[in-house]
Amino acid sequence: MTAAFSVPSRGNRVEHRARYTGPTYYELPPVKASFWGELVAAYLYVGGVAGASQIVATLADITGAPGRITRNGRLLALGGAAAGAALLVADLRTPQRWYNMLRIWRSTSPMSIGTWVLSAFAAASAAPAAAAAIGDRQTPPARALRAVARVSQLPAAAAGAAMTVYTAPLLSATSTPLWASAPRLLAVRFGSAAMATGSAALALADRGPVDGASRVPLDRLTGIAAAVELGASLSGDARARALGIEAPSRDPALRLLGTAALAVGCGIPLVCHLLNELQSRRSPALSRLAAVAALAGGYLMRSSVLRSGNESARRAQDTFALAQPRHLPVRQDPGVPTRSVGGS
């Protein structure tokens, strides 16, 4: 039984396999589901929006885009970092655990890396946000702060990029079957969803014309990120099914939540942006609808991933299916009833 729980190499090509019908131990799950719920889903969501906002703000500042994008992005990044820290401390139940995690650096622990990524992101985002808050004042301290912000925005954007994807390794490093089934696709899914929600939030905050030099790039970035998220989501779901992980497809509520996440977070923004691209004059209503849908769908996606993953951990068949050697199909004996180990 011990060898069955060793997760094989993830770099191998996965062949389609039938659902696992081999023996289990009284249908008891061999791994425990996590305690992560909506509080962690909110942390994943807020952190992604904050990280992507800092990336967009830095790109806007470097390329000479309208200053309001840079200003809004910097403020949203720092606000998201503060909110994310509060959500993380709330999930840890006590602030002392946050402090204890900062006492060490463990390169093999995604949670340790994530704690330092969030801390570095918040620290690097402070000066750009302060420069955004003071506006265009021309006093010597204000000019010095803006100079510091132009330098610190680069490490802030780098940490922001890590913020958008590091939560995927945090989940996939566990023994939860669904999360561990496609770690690279999960990272692409989280990163693209973060870019979609971050650019959507900045598009809603932008008061410029919908055909202006700021809104159009933000809308297009939202649409491109939503398309990438859709592709990664469908590919990840197909990979999980190919490995025999069936928890999301067997629960009607999880199927509905996953479908809603794709329809709201990817489908609606893509349709709205396609219609805007085909029109001679862009519609403000379609632009706002796409942004709101992307923001709502981004949260639904993370909630769906957490719930479906926890459900897969509760299904013994999903864990055993993932633990099978990937170069061999799951063995089935037609006509012979499947019995659990020790069962009758």
Image (cartoon, rainbow, N blue to C red):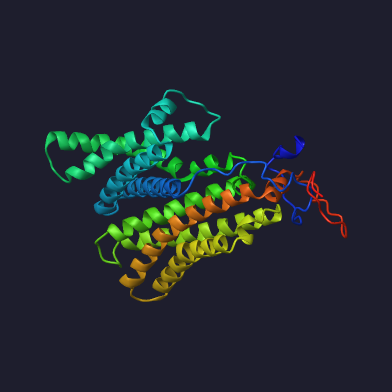
Residue 88 x %, y %: 40, 39
Give residue 5's position: percent from left, percent from top: 71, 38
Residue 11 quadrant:
top right
On the image, which quarter does residue 233 sit in? bottom right
| Residue found farthest to the left | 139
Look at 42% across and 70% down and name the residue there: 272
Residue most extreme to the front: 344
Residue 214 visible in the snapshot? no
Left or right, 183 with respect to 160, comes to right
Quadrant of the rendering where the N terminus is positioned: top right
The percent coordinates of residue 87 (x first, y second) are 38, 42
Residue 133, can we see it?
A: yes
Query: Image quadrant of residue 258?
Result: bottom right
189 left or right of 55?
A: right
Q: Does residue 252 lie above or below 160 as drawn? A: below
Of 1 and 213, nearer the camera is 1
Task: Please tell me which residue lies in front, 67 or 192.
Answer: 192
